[in-house]
Amino acid sequence: MKKILLFFCFCFFFSFSQEKAATYFDVQLFRGTVYKHSNDISHLITGHPDGFLISYNWKTFGKKEWQQVYNYPDYGVSYHYLDFKNQYLGVNHAVGLHYNFYFFKRHLMFRISQGIGLTSSPYDKVTNNKNNAFGTKIMDNNYFLLQYKKENIIEKIGLQAGFMLTHFSNGRFKAPNKGINTFTFNVGLNYNFEKEQDYIVDSLPSKTSYKEKIKYNLAFRTGISEGPVPHLGQRQFYHIGLYADKRIGRKSALQLGTDVFFSRYLQDYIKFVSVAFPVGHESYTHPDTDYKRVGLFVGHELFISKLSIETQVGYYVYKPFDYEIDYYQRVGIKYYLYKNLFTGVGLKTHVGRAEAIEATVGIRF
């Protein structure tokens, strides 16, 4: 998983490395609360988490077509520190890459970030068996930031304040993995290193250039995952997606398709349940129950540059083993290596519970 995220870090900076842009720095303090998405994490919510967020940002001014389309966003790298105020969770660190998008005359900023997290106190069978949120020391982290932002209030110094949602999880790479979602209020300062440049506003191509016929996609997703019970063992999974998409403009395409899930860790979990619960118990499952699942989904792809953001919502039409709910979600990042060949990384979840971090390769034809 670390290699996958490092690959996307490389792709991110390679996409912009040839462009000289104005830069700025921001530092923020925050305080918030942990969202109780499951009663199983009640013992992990004992105080109001706090911490700080530091970011370095590159501004865009329309030298590339996608920058004009998205109202001249920023891109950057950030680090944040989060103290959960809980003896079992300890503190977390995270480093991530982000985009800042602007609205309402650039006073409202929305940031989306993807990165790697590190916890000081992961689950340990002997020393920390109460931490059922983080089964590994290294995890996936993403956060969303919505803020009012005003630059250059006092010379190059500005102010920003708003709200953040940050999520830590290992994507069921190893159990346990309840994950933690934290809502916070942020306030901080920003500092511009260079003067503003003029925005380029007159080089967008005609909208008709993005009209396409329906395209078909074949995606192969894989990774390692473990069942919800610790020490069942990590297993390779294979998820195959076949879907159609229709480009509806410069930014968006709509998707409709099917997934077939070969999640091998479910084989181990089915055997565990068949032994743990006797015949006649409501939770009893026959050891030969099929572990495979099939889902239908609708989705949306947001095109930025060579990167795009993919969101999907699906429903299982075949699921012999009664595991999790009948709906699933997927959020991921895609990178187009060539016009029709892509790779990516995504998170498959059941509402607030992660099931797998998926490494993807695919073709669009």
Image (spheres, grey):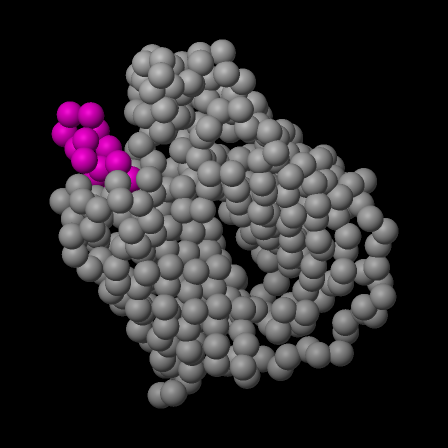
Q: Is residue 235 magenta?
A: no
Task: Please identify the quarter of the rendering in which residue 82 is found.
Answer: bottom left
Q: Residue furthest bottom?
A: 154
Residue 68: image location, x then y, percent: 67, 72
Task: Please identify the quarter of the rendering in which residue 234 is found.
Answer: top left
Q: Is residue 235 visible?
A: no
Residue 110: image location, x then y, percent: 48, 68
Which residue is at a point 29% across and 38% down the rendered structure image?
Answer: 134
Which residue is at a point 27% across and 66% down the rendered structure image?
Answer: 30
Q: Is residue 229 visible?
A: yes
Q: Is residue 124 magenta?
A: yes
Closest to the observer: 138 or 173? Answer: 173
Which residue is at a point 53% across and 35% down the rendered structure image?
Answer: 358
Which residue is at a point 17% across and 33% down the rendered structure image?
Answer: 128
Magenta-highlighted residues = 120-133
Q: Is residue 115 above or below residue 323?
A: below
Residue 310: image location, x then y, percent: 60, 50
Q: Is residue 96 above or below residue 69?
A: above
Q: Seen in the image, is 94 located left or right of residue 91? A: right
Main secondary-structure element of the magenta-colored stretch? loop
Q: Seen in the image, is 290 located left or right of residue 235? A: right
